Amino acid sequence: MSDLYALILAGGSGTRLWPMSRQASPKQLISLGRELSLFQETVSRITARIEPGKMVFVTSRELEGDIRDHLRRLLGEKSSDCIIVGEPSARNTAPAVLLGARIVQARDPEALLLVAPSDHIIQDTASFIQAIDDSLEAAASGMIVTYGITPTRAETGYGYIKAGEKEGNVYRVERFEEKPDAARAEELFLDQKYTWNSGIFLFSVKTIMEEAEKHLPVQTSALKRIDPETLDGLDEVYSGMKSMSIDHGIMEKTDRAAVIPVSMGWSDLGSWDSFYEIRPKDSSGNVVSGDVLGRDNENCLILGEDKFLAVSGMKDTIVVQTDDATLICPRGRSQDVRHIVAHLEEQGRSERLVHLTVRRPWGSYTILTESDLYKVKRLSVDPHQKMSLQKHERRSEHWVVVKGEVVVTLGEDQITLKANEGVTIPIGTLHRIENPGEETAELVEVQLGDYLGEDDIVRFDDDYGRVK
C-alpha cells in the first residue's frame, strides 16, 4: 500500500463564530473553552494515523506564523518536520488542494493524500481513523473518496451526498445536492442513501491531478508553474487564479467519486447553533462556559472569557462575551452573525479584525487603551522566545518591565532589563525583545506616533518564518 500523507486546510476569515473568532484569529485558532484550538485538535487527531513529517498545511500568509506557533505548542520539535504554505490570497479549496497535492506528489508520486479542514469537530476519533483505513484500498484503486456523515436531523446548512452502488467498503457517488430548503432537508434525512458532505477526502495524488487536468485544465496548468519544492512562482500564479471549491471544480464532475458513510460526532461548527447542538448540557438544557452566574435559564448557550458574566431568566438564547464585544441573539438566528460582521466592516471597526488580546508566536499582547496619538499594551513574552528583529517607520515605543527579565536589542547594543527598568525605542531603530528565562516576562509598552497600526513593522530576522 502507498504511503499516506495529510493535507490540512487552515485558512479562514473568522466570521461565523464572531465575537470569539476574528479575521486575525479565525475559528480554527480558537479553543472555544477546550484545552486545544480546533486546529490543534485536528492535528492531534490525524497524528494518530499520520506522522508530522507527512503533513502539509495550506493557510493564508497572514496566519502562517500563528499556524507555526500552534504546531510548535502541540508537537514540539516535530513541528519543524511539517510543510506550511501561506497562500498570498484566498482562492477557495480547489487551488489549495491541488497545490498541496503537487507538493506531496513531488515527494512521493504514489502517495495517498487525506484532505481535512482544520476547523471541524470530530468527537469519535476511533471511528474517524477506522473510516480512513476502510477507504485506503478504494483510494489506491483510483477513486476519490469522501466521508459522508450519517445525518442526525433534517439540516439545511449542509450539502448532501447520495450513495449509489456499493464497491468494497465504499459506495459510488450517485449525486451531490446543495444545501436544501427545510422541506427537502426532511426528505433527505429520511432517505438512508443520503449523508452530509463533510468536506474530508482521500485519494491518490496521481488520481486527483488526472481529474484536475480533465475538469480544471486552466487552473492546473497555472499551478504547474509553481515549483513544488521552493514555491517559486506562487505569488504570480495566485494573482490570476480563479476562486473555486473542490466540490464544484472536481467532485461534482468526476465519475470516480465514492463515499463512505461514517458516524463520528462530526460538526463543521458553522454557527453558534451548531456549537450548542454538540456540547454537553446541564439539567436545564444550557451550555455554559467561563466565569458565569446563571439563574433560571433554559436551553441557552452562555459563553464568557475572563470577565464575570451574569445571565438570568433567559430561554433559547445565545450569549457570547469577549473582552471587547458581546453577542446576544435567539437560538436559531446565529447565522445572522454574518450581517453583524458585515456592518462592522462597513464601519471600519476593529472588533471585526482582532481581539484586545492577540496571540503571537512569541507570546501575546493586550491593548489596554488607545487613541489617535498613543496606544498602551501589555506584552507577555514566553520563556525562551523572542520577537522578530524589527523597526517602525512612524512610531516610537517605550518599554517598562513589570515581571521577569528580558534582553533588549537596541540598534547595535544589547541591554538586560529587570522589573521596574525600561528603555525607549526611537522611530526607525532596530529592536527586539528576548526572554531567556524560565518564566513568562511581562512589559508595558507605550506607542507614540502619527500612525499606530500593526502593519507599521519591517522585519529583518524572525524565528517563526515571518520574513519573506
Image (cartoon, rainbow, N blue to C red):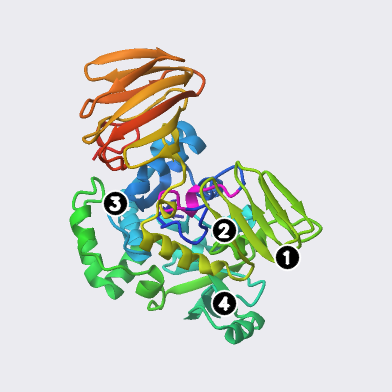
> Per the image, is 31 magenta?
yes
Q: Are marks 3 and 4 in contact (CB under 8 Å)?
A: no
Give the amino acid at mark 1: Lys
Please name the residue shown 38% across and 78% down the image: 253
Q: Which residues are magenta?
A: 22-32
How far apart, in angstroms, are the residues tagged by discs 1 and 3?
Answer: 55 Å
- Residue 287, located in which quarter of the rendered image? bottom right
Label 3 element class: helix
Rendered image: mark on residue 66: none
**Label 4, residues with CA under 10 Å away: few <14, some 14-19, many ≥20:** some
How far apart, in angstroms, are the residues tagged by discs 2 and 4?
Answer: 23 Å
Label 1 element class: loop
For this rendering, which residue is in front, 396 or 172? 396
Q: Are marks 2 and 4 in contact (CB under 8 Å)?
A: no
Left or right of 111, for residue 438:
right
Left or right of 289, for residue 403:
left
**Label 1, residues with CA under 10 Å away: few <14, some 14-19, many ≥20:** some
Q: Are marks 1 and 3 in contact (CB under 8 Å)?
A: no
Residue 407 higher or lower than 112, as above or below: above
**Residue 427 at x, y percent in the picture:** 22, 29
**Label 2, residues with CA under 10 Å away: few <14, some 14-19, many ≥20:** some
Rendered image: mark on residue 327: 2
For this rendering, which residue is in front, 266 or 464? 464
- Residue 267, located in which quarter of the rendered image? bottom right
Badge 4 is on which residue? 156
**Residue 223 at x, y percent in the picture:** 24, 60
Rendered image: mark on residue 106: 3
Please name the residue shown 34% across and 55% down the image: 100
Left or right of 460, for residue 92:
right
